[in-house]
Amino acid sequence: MTQVDLRRAGDADIEEIAELTNWAYRGTGEVASWTVESYLEGLRTTPETLRADIAANPDARLLTWRGEAGELLGHFWLEPPADGATWYLGLLSVRPDRQDQKLGRRLLAAGEDFARARGATRLQMTVINVRDTLIAWYQRRGYALTGEVRPFPYGDDRFGRPRRDDLSFVVLEKAL
């Protein structure tokens, strides 16, 4: 498997995308992701939340990557800005039981290529400030901290319930 074939998610994909997202962000046990958010409880997303986000952002794309047998290997959210230059990438998730196959870096590169082909000159993302290992992973792939910090949405359980009170989002960017 060498090529990452991205497809826009359809309504039939939403349940599976929510399941994979929750496994990647909140899974536990032997096949938990190395990026699990143990400082949050509850689900990372739901099918209803994903559908609402898609409806509210018609220019955004929720893109999926499936293996040869049709299994969902990963997905991410990509949203173009009004100015067309700096796109937002989020919700990057790959199967935790296959992370040793470098799926995340391949999916991220495919997302960068996808955005670049549509006019993006920069990608931006937000990561929870205490995710040092994940921030370092993105930095090794060319993303840099911008110095911008955004508040964590305490009281909005869409992202889970925080177990600590020092969470925020740091902004990372990469020139394409």
Image: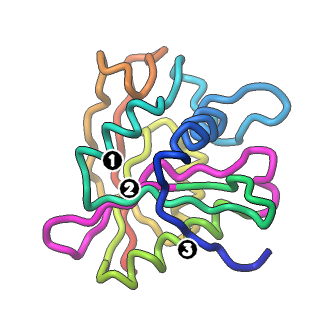
Please state which of residues 60 and 120 is positioned toward the viewer in this rendering: 60
Examine the rendered structure and indicate whether residue 173 appears above or below residue 131: below
Question: Can you identify the residue that label 2 sits on?
Answer: 125
Q: Which residues are magenta?
A: 76-101
Q: Amino acid at mark 1?
A: Ile
Mark 2 or 3, nearer chain start: 3
Question: Can you identify the residue that label 3 sits on?
Answer: 110
Mark 1 or 3, nearer chain start: 1
Name the outermost residue toward the right: 30
Give the crowd class for mark 1: few <14, some 14-19, many >=20 residues within 10 Å. some
Q: Amino acid at mark 3?
A: Ala
Q: Position of residue 78 (x, y in %)?
A: 38, 61
Element assignment for label 3 = helix
Instruction: Tell me the quarter of the picture where residue 149 sits.
Output: top left
Residue drawn at 74 percent across, 63 percent down: 67
Residue drawn at 64 percent across, 73 percent down: 4
Q: Which mark is residue 54?
A: 1
Q: Position of residue 83 (x, y in %)?
A: 14, 72
Element assignment for label 2 = strand
